[in-house]
Image (tube, rainbow, N blue to C red):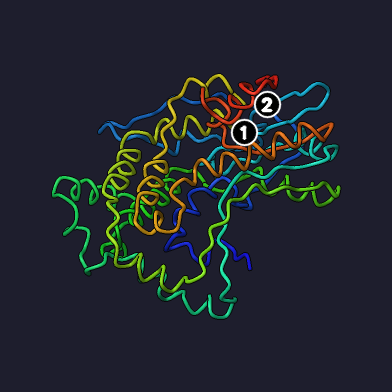
Amino acid sequence: MRRPLHLFCVAVLYLACLFQAHAQAGAPAVAQDDEPALAVPAPVFDQDGVLELETMVVTGSQPGPGMWKVSNGDNVLWVMGTLSPLPARMQWLSRDVVEVVARSQEVIEPPGVTVKSGIGRVRGLMLVPSLFRARKNPEGERLQDVLDPELYARWNVLKARYLGRSNKTEDWRPIFAARELYQAGVKRSGLSEDNVVAPVVRATAKRYQVKTTSPLVTIALEEPKQAIREFSASPLGDIKCFETTLARLETDLAAMVTRANAWAIGDVEALRALPYQDQNRTCIDTLLQSGLARSRGIDDLPLQVRTAWLDAAESGLRNNAETFAMLPVSELIKPDGYLAQLEARGYQVEAP
C-alpha cells in the first residue's frame, strides 16, 4: 500500500521530503487579474551592515515567469518553472497557466519519491514516536558535542537570529537542525516555501478532467520499524550538509530574495544571471551515502527520479497535442537540466 510521505519523513523520509520540496501544495493566494509588475529592488543594508530583508520582498499580484515550450512536430509540452522560496505576500497571476492546463490532454507533476509499506495505517501511526526519536543524535550527544567550536559558534549566531531562545534542536542530528534553521530563516526573510503553482494546476486539471501523471520513484520499506532502528543507530556524516545550510543563510539570503522577486515579476534573464545555491543537493548526497540507503538499493535515486520524469515527458510529446508540466526553474536553465536533456534527444526547446 502506498503511504503518504509525511508518515516516514523523519527517517528515510528526510530524503524523500527533499525530492518532494517543489511538489508540495501550499495555500497562498492566487490572483487572476493583471496588475503592473514591480521592479526588483536592490539589497538594502543598515548601518551595521545587516541586510534589511523586509524592504526587499515584492508583494501584490505578480505574473511569474512565462512557460518554456518543448516541441515534437505539432505536439507541445509547456513547462512552468517553479521556485522555492517565493515572496510570502505575493499573489500569483495564474490566468495563462490555467488556460494552458484547461486545453491540455495531460498534466505531468514534478518528479518525486514515495514510500510503500505493507504494515497498514494503524501500525504506521504507532511508529510516529520512533520517528521523532530518530531525529536525535544516536548517543544522546548535543550539537555542541558533534560540531567543532567554530561551526557551533556560527550556529549559535544564526540560531539566535532565527530560532530565538528555543533549545529543541540542540540534541538533533545536524541535518535536521539545519533544516529547522533554514525554514525559520526563510520565513523571517519574508519568504515562503509554499508552492503557488501546484494547487492551481491540480485544481484546474480536476475541473477540466485533464489526465494527471505523477512520475514517482517508489521506495519499498517493508520493515519500517527495523529501518527506523537502523537509522537511529547509524552515523550519517552530515556535518557537510549542516555547514552548507549555514553558509547559505549567511551568504545567499540577499540573492535568495532577489531570485524570488525575479520569479515573481517574470524576469527570466535575472533568474539565469543569478547564481543558484541549493544546500539540499549536499543533504541528499549525505543520505544517499548512508548505509541505510545503500542496503536498500536507493543510492541512485537522483538518476531514477530524472529518468521517471523524462520518460513521462517523452510520452506526452509523442501522444498529446498539448501537455503541461511543472519543474524547478533551476532544472530549466542549467546546462545539464531536464530541458537540456530533452533538447539533446532532438526536441525543440524555446525559453519564454
**Quarter of the N terminus within the rendering:** bottom right
Q: Which residue is mark 1?
A: 81
Query: Residue flagged by tag 2: what amino acid is it?
Result: Trp
Q: Residue at x 74, y 37 (%)?
A: 315
The quadrant in which residue 245 appears is: top left
**Count of numbered tags:** 2
Mark 2: give few (<14), some (14-19) or many (20+) Cα within 10 Å.
some
Q: Which residue is mark 2?
A: 68
Q: Residue at x 58, y 23 (%)?
A: 268
Query: For the residues marked 1 and 2, what is the alpha-carbon distance in whole angstroms?
Result: 8 Å
User: In the image shown, does 195 or 29 lie closer to the viewer?
Assistant: 195
Q: Position of residue 81 (x, y in %)?
A: 62, 33
Mark linked to residue 122: none
Q: Is residue 33 above or below residue 142?
A: above
Cβ–Cβ under 8 Å for marks 1 and 2 = yes
Q: Residue at x 70, y 42 (%)?
A: 108
Secondary structure state at the residue bearing disc 1 = strand
